[in-house]
Amino acid sequence: MLFNIVAAFVIPWIAGIYLVKKDFTLFLLIAPFAAFVAIIFDVVGIHFDFWRIDPEYEMETISAMPMYFGIYPILAGFLFMSIKRTSFHPFVIILCFSLITTIIEGIGVWIDLVHYSNGWTIYWTYVSYLLAYLVCYGYFLVLKRHVPI
C-alpha cells in the first residue's frame, strides 16, 4: 500500500503543486468532480470483477484511494489546463490524456499492481479513460457557461 500512496498520491501531488499555482480556480472546480468520476468508474469495474488493485482488502476500493485523490484529479487538472491554454482541439487533447493514463495503468499491470479479468484488457482501459475524460469535459463545458474559468 505504501507504493500506491507514493506512486499514485505523493508524486502526482508534487506535480500538482504547479497546477494549483498556475490555475487554482480551475483545479478547485475540476479535481473533486474528476475524483468522483474515478470512484464511480472504479466501483463499477470492481463490482463486475473487471479488475482488482493490489494489495487486496476486504473493501477493494481502499487500494485505489490514493489514485482517486491523487493521480486522477491531478491528470484531469492538467488536461483542462491544456485545453484552456493550447490551440489543439479538445478532443485531440482528451485522446492524448486517455493514452497517457492508460500507459500509466499499463505499467501497473506490468508490475502486477493491477489485475484484469472477465475479458477486460488494456484496450477497454483506454475506452474507460476516454469516457471518463469525456464526462469530465462535459462538466467543464457546463462550468464554462456558469463560472468564469
Image (spheres, helix red, strand yellow):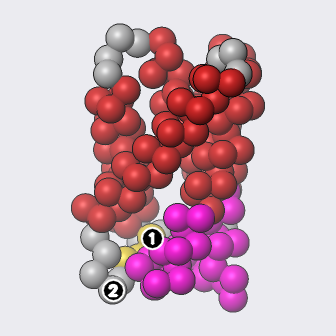
Q: Is mark 2 on a helix, strand or loop?
A: loop
- Seen from the viewer's position, the closer of residues 29 and 10 is 29
- Left or right of 99 in this view: 40: right
- The residue to which callout 1 is attached is 114
- Seen from the viewer's position, the closer of residues 16 and 46 is 46
Q: Position of residue 130 (x, y in %)?
A: 37, 49
Q: Is mark 1 on a helix, strand or loop?
A: strand
Q: Does the segment drawn in magenta span residue 143? A: no
- The residue to which callout 2 is attached is 118
Q: Where is residue 45 in the image (x, y as percent from the top left)?
A: 48, 74
Would you place residue 79 above or below residue 50 in this image? Answer: above
Q: Does the segment drawn in magenta span residue 59? A: yes
Q: Position of residue 36 (x, y in %)?
A: 66, 55
* Quarter location, residue 92: top left
- Seen from the viewer's position, the closer of residues 62 and 140 is 140
* Quarter location, residue 14: top right
The stretch of residues the image draws in magenta is 40-67
The amino acid on which the numbered mark 2 sits, given as a three-letter code, is Asn
1 vs 2, front mark: 2
Q: Which mark is residue 92?
A: none
Q: In which quarter of the image is the N terminus?
A: bottom right
Q: Which residue is drawn at 70% across and 22% down?
A: 147
The amino acid on which the numbered mark 1 sits, given as a three-letter code, is Val
Would you place residue 148 above or below residue 60 in this image? Answer: above
- Left or right of 126 in this view: 57: right
Would you place residue 22 above or below residue 123 in this image? Answer: above
Q: Residue at x 48, y 12 (%)?
A: 85
- Report how far apart the C-alphas of labels 1 and 2 lie in the structure: 14 Å
Q: Which residue is drawn at 37% across and 26% down?
A: 90
- Left or right of 15 in this view: 92: left
